[in-house]
Amino acid sequence: MRSPYFERLSEVKSDPRLRRLIALGDKAKVSQIIKAIVARSKRAGQFKSRFAYAPLILLYHRVAELPSDSQLLSVTPDHFAEHLEILRRYARPMALRDMVRALRENKVPRRAVAVTFDDGYADNLHNAKPLLERYEIPATVYVSSGYVDTSREFVHDTLEGLLLQPGSLPRRLELTFGEHTHQWDLGEHAHYSEDEYQKNRAWHVLKTEDPTARHSVYRSLCQLVYALSDAERRAALDVLMKWAGTRFACRSAYRVLGSEEIRILAKDGLVDVGSHTVTHPVLSARPSADQRDEVQRSKACLEEILDRPVSSFAYPYGTRSDYTENLCHRTRSRI
Ligand SMILES: [Zn+2]
């Protein structure tokens, strides 16, 4: 069963003993981390052979105060500090690379936990790293290299900025993806007032109800664009910008790390950097040449920035349908 604010991912394809627990927004509870650590520690006691050790990987995205967080990606700095305090007190925080080495040698300590971040948002350096330093807890940050040193936001952020902020949009929207044309009607919410925005800003995609047509369109578009290639996504966003009558610029709170920031992040070795593809596609939905390109170019780009090998990789989205056995096999051979 899925806990409400932490979602367990059957991640880390190379080793069934590893599990990743994803922090779903700022409501991710310290108590749930403790429960997970204790549960896995008990499990460690029960199984002597293959599951003799049961380390845990925590997956974060952002540490920031955001006015709204429709994808549940962000934990506030205060809550993140609480999480780290708990990890320091009750667990054995370790770098993911050390955890992998310990697993190979069958020497993982009980209650081992590794902290990781996906995507490479700039707040990982500015908000998360000072706290990691305070508690002396290592982490790995997986960066989507195609967003580094650009003024692009991730597509879900752009869609949120276009659709879920107060203002006026044309009432009707028509978009064609491949052979399918989709039409939406924003109805009375073509104009979205500041009051309505404030009323709905706690909404997120796990809510079963959409408070306005804008939220339904946001939800549909997120689904539709995820499986597209980067070029198709850009084309779709161009159409949306024209429709909205705006040139949407990257907001500073939503930007990805720049090259220099990546070097600073990784400088003293507390934070490791891994690759997370170039354009953050659903890899399983791309042809194999694209998959290879996404894995290789991302690794090469980060290696050039850091001037050292990058040997860790996280799959975008990371649920079972987002990768295949074949893909994992080929990725491992390239990393
Ligand atoms: Zn990601």
Image (cartoon, grey):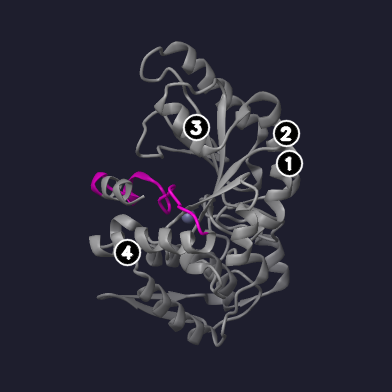
| Residue sticking out furthest to the front | 307
First-in-chain label (2 vs 3):
2
For label 3, the SS is helix
The foreground one among 280 and 185 is 280
Residue name at image x 72 percent, y 56 percent: 65
Q: Which residue is mark 2?
A: 85
Q: Which residue is mark 3?
A: 99
Residue kind at label 1, given as amino acid type: Ala
Residue kind at label 2, given as amino acid type: Glu
Q: Check if residue 318 falls in the magenta segment.
A: yes
Residue 49 point in image, percent of width and height: 37, 15
Q: Which residue is mark 1?
A: 81
Callout in the foreground (2, 4):
4
Residue name at image x 31 percent, y 50 percent: 331
Cα separation between marks 2 and 3: 20 Å
Q: Are marks 2 and 3 in contact (CB under 8 Å)?
A: no
Please give the label number shown on residue 293. Answer: 4
Q: Are marks 1 and 2 in contact (CB under 8 Å)?
A: yes
Residue name at image x 65 percent, y 36 percent: 29
Q: Are marks 3 and 1 in contact (CB under 8 Å)?
A: no
First-in-chain label (4 vs 1):
1
Range drawn in magenta: 307-326
Q: Main secondary structure of the magenta part?
A: loop
The foreground one among 244 and 315 is 315
Cα separation between marks 3 and 1: 22 Å
Q: Quadrant of residue 160?
A: bottom right
